[in-house]
Amino acid sequence: MTSLDQARELLREFPVVDGHNDLPWALRKQVGYDLDARDIAVHQNAHLHTDLPRLREGGVGAQYWSVYVRSDLPDPVPTTLEQIDCVRQLLARYPQELAPALTAADMESARAEGRIASLMGAEGGHSIANSLGTLRGLYALGVRYMTLTHNDNVAWADSATDEPGVGGLSAFGRAVVREMNREGMLVDLSHVAATTMRDALDTSTAPVIFSHSSARAVCDHPRNVPDDVLERLPANGGMAMVTFVPKFVLQAAVDWTAAADDNMRAHGLHHLETTEEAMKVHRAFEEHHPRPVATVSTVADHLDHMREVAGVDHLGIGGDYDGTAFTPDGLNDVSGYPNLIAELLDRGWSKADLAKLTWQNAVRVLGAAEDVARDIRATRGPSNATIESLDG
């Protein structure tokens, strides 16, 4: 039996829990949520990284669908609600394939039924508009993690890719983390500055996650996790979910991506756009400036390092499909996860270790957050603190 055969066999028992997929935003940008125009029951290779046949081929058993909205929107809350509605439409349209999931127990039930557990994560604290009531509202609607920032700072937390603002988390930012703990919403530290990571770990009494981040020691990009933060995950109980985005995993891709982003802006496009128009601009740029190509091995190098620093109990996978213009060779879309598992088998990872990476760690972390929330709610009610009262 080849390593790839072994990988597929393992994924039938312990499928992938992927921490981050931007399909809802891609559906918004490409077809205005017209699910007939992008019927994911059939292959959408020409338009998307994600569809149901390829999720099955890739051995995905649970997916955190990102309900991301751009941080430069003047009023992000309604757009976040539209993103949540998109996920709900997908669940209603494909009930044989997608199972709504709010808890760790729901994830296990979906696995037993052979359906893909579907959870939601909000990508950026701007989605709550400085309101703890809005945070609780998102939780009530099914959002089970929130990334504290996206690419830009929020008033109460610093982003990895913006200039320092409050030096990590402000007093209100710490209140946000505590309220997330009380609700059972996972604190996601992808995209945040290292100072914010450390402040969040100092504040959170529940496990944190990195829904789609890799190792800074392997690729020196501020979006990645420094070793001193990885070292704190065992005491916290949290996990870092390796991402596949080439500009975060391959050092040679960092400078190339900066030039490609500048080219997008010069054409009047947002540098993160993945529409057909945007991809034409990308391809034209790439014809004259060959793109450094990441591979399955590149991603495996990050996981080897992260396992050495944090331990296998604190690792997962967050591909960021449909949220990136480029993907590594062998991980071209959501069908590629078996290639990564086969590579790790060839590097000596045990099946027990891989079961933790793909399924068990993510289920454990969500369950632990639920346990912490239950204890907190027994001792205190919801906070009505405001940013004005705490940060002045």
Image (cartoon, rainbow, N blue to C red):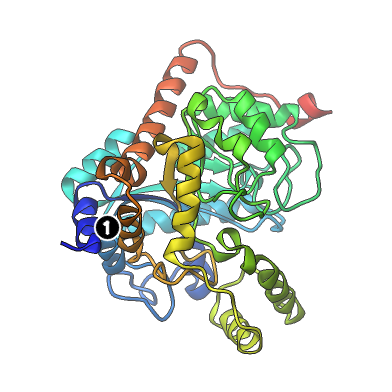
Of residue 301 and residue 253, the one placed in the foreground of this image is 301
Labels in figure, total? 1
Name the residue at the right extreme: 392
Residue 96 showing in the rendered view: no
Task: Return the residue nearer the eye: 252 or 207.
Answer: 252
**Residue 18, percent across and down?**
39, 51
Residue 185 shown left or right of residue 176 in the figure: left
Q: Determine if residue 81 is in view.
A: yes
The residue drawn where x is 80% and y is 44% is 164
Which quadrant of the structure image shows residue 135?
Answer: top right
Q: In which quarter of the image is residue 333?
A: bottom left
Q: How crowded is mark 1: few (under 14 residues within 10 Å), some or many (20 or more)?
A: many
Where residue 290 appears, as percent x and y from the top left, is: 61, 83
**Residue drawn at 58 percent across, 53 percent down:** 218
Quarter of the figure that contains the N terminus? bottom left
Question: What is the quadrant of the C terminus in the image?
Answer: top right
Q: Residue at x 74, y 47 (%)?
A: 153
> Circle 1 sits in a helix, a strand or a loop, which is it?
loop
Residue carrying label 1: 59
Image quarter for residue 196? top right
* Residue 322 location (% of width, % of height): 48, 66
| Residue 256 position within the rendered picture, expressed as x and y whole percent measured from the top left | 67, 73
Q: Callout 1, which amino acid?
A: Gly
Left or right: 236, with 34 as reference point: right
Q: Relative to residue 250, is residue 298 drawn left or right?
A: left
Vertical order, 376 against 337 (above or below): above
Q: Between 26 and 200, which is closer to the camera in this rendering?
A: 200
When the figure is inspected, residue 42 is found, relative to residue 106, above or below; the finding is: below
Task: Judge whether 122 appears above or below 89 on screen.
Answer: above
